[in-house]
Amino acid sequence: MKGNIFEVFNRKPVEIPIVAVTGGKGGTGKTTVAVNLTVTLSNKGRRILLVDTDVDSPTTAIVYGIESKPVEEVKIFTPKINEEKCTKCGKCVNACRAHALIQITEKSPMFFEQLCSGCEACILACPHGAIENGGKTVGLINQSSNNNVTLIGGELKPNEARSAQVVTATKDFAFKKTTKENFDMMVVDTPPGTHCNVVQSLRCADLALAVTEPTPLGIYDLDLILQLTARLKIPTHVVINKADAPGHDKEGVREVVKRYEAQVIGEVPFDKKLFQAPVDGNPFITTYPESKVSKAFMKVAESVVYQITKH
């Protein structure tokens, strides 16, 4: 890839710093870190826009303990054929590279929704204006507020496969939100993994925090996420969760981190109460502010502020 591609990818439509909390696999504590980082920063008077782009499994609101309400539908283009205008010329079918439109001789085109990419080529190809936008809701954007924090989260509707569109719509909604209200920072809780939704979630990030566990699987997936953020030219640091778990391999984590010229900025110890906090409906740091875990989150927050202001 050429450098200008990354310039376009990382071109920010907003002025505030963007921190993406990510990880190579699910279950590492990514959302826990994102929420408690947000609460720590908000307790210091900063206004934070927390964005949940894990649209297949949106749990940020649950971990935070606040209820979000839908504020916007995410819709995609789906062709609707106007039988009165359709001449059965087949030009829309020829234009559809996804083969979502097929035609039997002298019949109107038939539409197979599951194959449609939403590219709208059929509308451009039809000379008679017989293709209309049927529209389809594939997801929701939810919003809630609590003190200095506004939470925006995308949610894919059940049985839908267009999660990428919902992630993009959620990020764009968040960007627009910053033009209407004053925020000091945006924290993005990304999906786990290294797939397209993660790439879209990382878009415009000034800093990424890769959350990992000191286990063989955690180390393997950490290597993958650091490969991705290095390719995207996003500065990335690492938070080791469950750092003192039996059989931990923190040295293995540090070897991978060193390879990518990153650094470990926090080690969060294991605490059974981390599982209880979402049940109680409060962020961990709110319920147990004096615990070792909370102090670890505070250290991460201090490092994030330092890294952002340094650049």
Image (spheres, grey):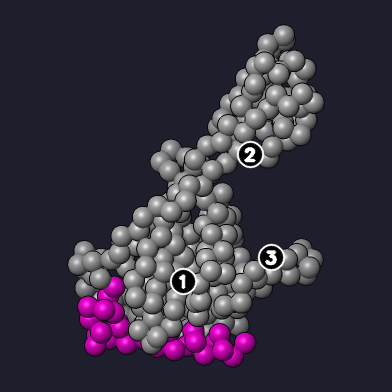
Q: Specify whether 88 is left or right of 251.
A: right
Q: Which residue is mark 3?
A: 9
Residue 187 sits above or below residue 101 on the image: below
Residue 208 sits above or below residue 45 on the image: above
Asked whether 294 falls inside the magenta stretch, the response is yes
Helix, strand or loop at mark 2: loop
**Which of pointers 2 and 3 indicates the residue nearer the eye?**
2
| Residue 29 visible in this rendered orientation of the protein | no
Instruction: Please report the residue visible at 48 percent of the width from the left and 59 percent of the height from the top.
Output: 53
Instruction: Please report the residue visible at 49 percent of the width from the left and 84 percent of the height from the top.
Output: 304
Q: Which residue is mark 2?
A: 118
Amino acid beneath label 1: Leu
Q: Residue 126, position in %: x, y?
A: 76, 27
Mark 3 is surrounded, within 10 Å at the Cα level, by few (under 14), some (14 to 19) or many (20 or more) other residues, namely some
Q: Marks 3 and 1, Cα distance to the nearest angstrom?
A: 21 Å
Instruction: Please report the residue visible at 65 percent of the width from the left and 71 percent of the height from the top.
Output: 12
